[in-house]
Image (tube, rainbow, N blue to C red):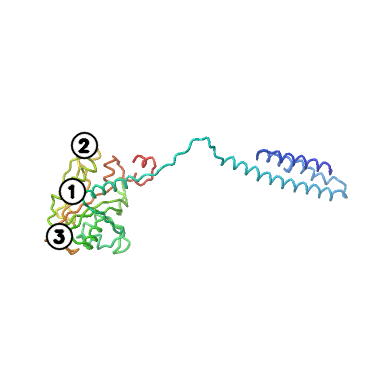
């Protein structure tokens, strides 16, 4: 039996050395060490030997089995490493893969375009905190705690007097507290309101503007906004100013443009009116000047505000504001 064990052992070692794949190695293991394997059969046949021969043959057979198990493990590690190297190998004959370059989000693009227009008109860019106090967000803008206009701005409150700003108007108040006239600024940034549908999101972007000096009048406001609309869209885009109400401006207006989709013929986007609202504006209310220490008898000014998403939707013909925040690469790659 010793010769049989040695013969099987040498055959198995030779097979292990010549195995060129994991599949071949697995079949060899089953053939020699499986439940019905050759060496396993020899181990079982030891019980048929004379009692005095069994211990020695058992020792020889178990030593052969352990040696084969070690040889199989070594071969397994070798073949797995070779397979890994083949998988990770680089074919230098293949053409290079171009690196996908990122691009600015459409909201960022429109924000920069809007800011560049107003910079050319002489405005400075000012930023401020997104977490605001009730005073700067409402009271300083002529909206005391019981003012009904607060209901129009569904607000995220952090505490009774701390909130996420609902517009960038607090930046205007902070700037007027810090600087004496003349003031000519725009305030871009994120704002927050409890609202979500195809035309509203809980977080969106605004750009607000403020000009304060001696003898600033409504004519100046109309010129600035007309120039802006003609540059952000085109000079063929008509404007109209409709009377409206804002607690921090008087008189106040809504600014509409001729529908950029149907050019005024009437369509679903403009509700078949031919006009689209794009921003609100007006002359700064004297009560706001009094809050920041400006003399309303000496200085006048105008303010305006617009939603960046609204401008982007009209400029690019997008009907659902939520598309800006769904991270759809196919959508974003269009801009």
Badge 3 crowding class, 10 Å Cα cut-off, few under 14, some 14 to 19, many 20 or more, is some
- What is the secondary structure assignment of the residue under circle 3? helix
Q: Which mark is residue 94?
A: none
Q: Is residue 8 above or below residue 155?
A: above
Front residue (pair 165, 113): 113
Name the residue rendered at 21%, 38% in the picture.
272
Q: Is residue 112 above or below residue 260?
A: below
Mark 2 — residue?
263
Q: CA distance from mark 1 to mark 2?
A: 22 Å
| N-term-proximal mark, 2 vs 3 | 2
Badge 1 crowding class, 10 Å Cα cut-off, few under 14, some 14 to 19, many 20 or more, is few
| N-term-proximal mark, 1 vs 3 | 1
Q: CA distance from mark 1 to mark 3?
A: 21 Å
Mark 1 — residue?
224
Q: Is residue 270 left or right of residue 79?
A: left
Q: Is residue 237 above or below residue 146?
A: above
Q: Which mark is residue 286?
A: 3
Q: Position of residue 144 (x, y in %)?
A: 21, 62
Please identify the quadrant where the N terminus is shown. Answer: top right
């Amino acid at each position: 039996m010793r010769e049989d064990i040695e013969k099987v052992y040498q055959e198995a070692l030779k097979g292990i050395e010549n195995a060129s794949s994991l599949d071949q190695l697995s079949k060899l293991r089953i053939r020699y060490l499986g439940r019905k394997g050759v060496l396993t059969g020899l181990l079982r046949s030891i019980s048929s030997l004379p009692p005095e021969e069994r211990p020695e043959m058992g020792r020889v057979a178990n030593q052969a089995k352990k040696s084969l198990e070690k040889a199989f493990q070594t071969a397994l590690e070798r073949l797995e490493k070779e397979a890994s190297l083949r998988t990770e190998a680089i074919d230098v004959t293949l053409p290079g893969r171009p690196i996908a370059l990122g691009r600015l989000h459409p909201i960022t693009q429109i924000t920069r375009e809007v800011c560049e227009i107003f910079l050319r008109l002489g405005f400075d860019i000012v930023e401020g905190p997104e977490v605001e106090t009730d005073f700067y967000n409402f009271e300083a803008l002529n909206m005391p705690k019981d003012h009904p206009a607060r209901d129009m701005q569904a607000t995220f409150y952090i505490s009774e007097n701390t909130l996420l700003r609902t517009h960038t108007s607090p930046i205007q108040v902070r700037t007027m507290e810090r600087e004496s006239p003349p003031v000519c600024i725009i305030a871009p940034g994120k704002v927050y309101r409890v609202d979500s549908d195809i035309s509203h999101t809980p977080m969106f972007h605004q750009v607000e503007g403020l000009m304060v000096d001696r003898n600033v009048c409504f004519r100046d406001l109309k010129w600035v906004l007309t120039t802006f609309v003609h540059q952000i869209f085109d000079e063929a885009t008509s404007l109209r100013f409709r009377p409206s109400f804002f607690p921090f401006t008087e008189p106040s207006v809504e600014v509409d443009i001729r529908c950029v989709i149907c050019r005024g013929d009437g369509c679903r986007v403009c509700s078949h009116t031919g006009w689209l609202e794009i921003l609100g504006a007006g002359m700064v209310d004297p009560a706001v000047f009094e809050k920041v220490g400006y003399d309303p008898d000496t200085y006048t000014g105008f303010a305006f505000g617009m939603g960046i998403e609204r401008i982007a939707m009209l400029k690019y013909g997008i009907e659902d504001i939520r598309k800006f925040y769904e991270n759809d690469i196919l959508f974003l790659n269009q801009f």
